[in-house]
Image: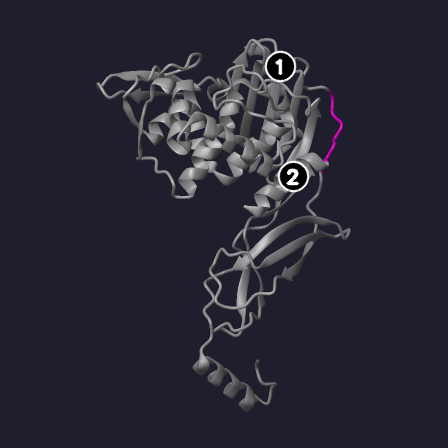
Amino acid sequence: MKKVLLILLTFFIGVSHILAADVTEYSESAILVEPTTGKVLYEKDADTRRAPASMTKIMSMILIMDAINNGNLSLDDKVMVSENASSMGGSQVYLNTGESYKVEELLKSIAIASANDAVVAMSEKIAGTEEKFVEMMNNKCQELGCTNTNFSNPHGLDQDNHYSSARDMALMATYLVTKHPEILKYTSIYEDYLQRPDGSNTWLVNTNKLVRFYKDVDGLKTGFTSTAGYCLTSTAKKNNMRLVGVVMGVDSPDNRTSDTVKMLNYGFNTYKLSVVYEKDKVIDEVRIEKSKDETVEIVLMDDATELLNINDATKDYTINIKLDNIKAPIKKGSKIGEAEIIDNNGNVVTKVGITVKKDVLKANLWDYFKRNLDILLSGKKIYK
C-alpha cells in the first residue's frame, strides 16, 4: 500500500517532464504515465480543474474494490435498489426500485455500461447514503495525493463543485490498476448482459470502444457531459509495460479516440520497461533477531523496474538493502525494509519494499541451546 502511494505522489513532484510533440491536438488537458514507476511521459495542461463526467466512477470503483479487498464486501453480496438509485438519469441500466442484484452484476454494469443507477446503488450499499459515500471519495482523493479534485456525486453528472484534473485522474487510475488489477476483468469486456430478477437481460456495451478496436487496451473509463466534453481515462499493456492515459475536454468521441490512440502509440513506441529484479527472487540472506533459523532469505515485494528509452541498452545494477529494526516472528509479506536499486552511474533507480521468503518463527530455548553448542564446538563467537 505504501509503495502504491509513494508511486502516486511522484506525479506531483514531476518525476519526469519529457518534452514531446503535441500528440493530443484535440484535448484541453492530457497526461500519459507509466504506473509502476510513476513517471510522466507526456502532459498538457494536466493540473487545470475540469468536469470529469463519468470518469468520476474510477474513484467509485476504487472504493468498491477497496471494500472487497478489506473483506467488508463480497462479489456475491446482494444489493437492494433504492428509489434514489433507480431515479438516476444519464447512462443507466434501468434498475427498478426494490430489485436485488449481486455486487458483481452492478460492478460489471458500472465498468462496462457506466451505469449511474448501479453506482448509486453501490454507494448506498457501502456507505449507507450517497452523501456519505461522496465523503469517502474525497477522503480517498486526499489519501492518494490529489490536489485538484472534489467530488459532489459518485456518478459524474454535472454538479456544482464537482471537478478533477488529468493528473489527478491518472493518480486514481494508477491506484486502481496497481492495487486492484482484477478490475480489468470487467473494464476489458466489450459487451455482456445484465440478468434481471424477472429473467430478462439488459445488453451492456462498453462506452470505451478502444477495448474492441485497440488490442492492448483493457480499460478504463469514458466520460461525457455538456460541461466536460468528451473524456477518457485509458489503460493498455504491451510488451510487459502498462500505460495510463487521460484526455479531457475533447469536442467529439472520434477526436477523443484519436488523441488517446496517438498518446498510447507515442508511449509504446518511445519507451520500454526494464525489469531489473523480479518480485520474490532471493536477493540476500540476513540475520534477524530472535529468529529460529540463523539466517533468513529476503525477497522483493514487487518487481524492481526502470523506465528506459526504447533504444537504451540494458544497464548493470546493484542493490543496497536497508533493514528495519525487526525481530522474529515475521509473516511473509510483511515489509521489513527497503531495497535501493542503483545503476552503474550511482543513481538510485527505484526503491522497493522487502520481505521474508517464508514465515520466520521465533526461536525457543532449545534452538538457542543447539545453535550456541554448535558455535562453541566450532570455536566461533557465541550467538546472541
- Where's residue 241, x and y in %? 58, 36
Q: Which colour scheme is used?
A: one colour
Name the residue rendered at 33%, 17% in the picture.
95
Where are the magenta residues, as a range? 14-21
Q: Is residue 105 magenta?
A: no
Can see residue 191? Answer: yes
Contact flag, marks 1 and 2 (Cβ < 8 Å) = no
Give neighbour class at mark 2: few <14, some 14-19, many 20+ (Cα, 10 Å). some
Q: Nearer the viewer, residue 44 or 152?
A: 152
Between marks 1 and 2, how big is the CA–CA gap?
A: 24 Å
- Where's residue 65, x and y in %? 44, 36
Task: Please tell me whether residue 339 is drawn above or below residue 114 in the rendered image.
Answer: below
- The type of residue carrying mark 1 is Gly
Can see residue 217? Answer: no
Q: Which residue has dot 2 on it?
A: 9
Q: In this view, does 344 lie to the left or right of 2?
A: right
Instruction: Kindly state the secondary structure of the residue where label 1 is placed.
Output: strand
- The type of residue carrying mark 2 is Leu
Question: Magenta: predominant secondary structure element?
Answer: loop
Name the residue rendered at 40%, 39% in the picture.
68
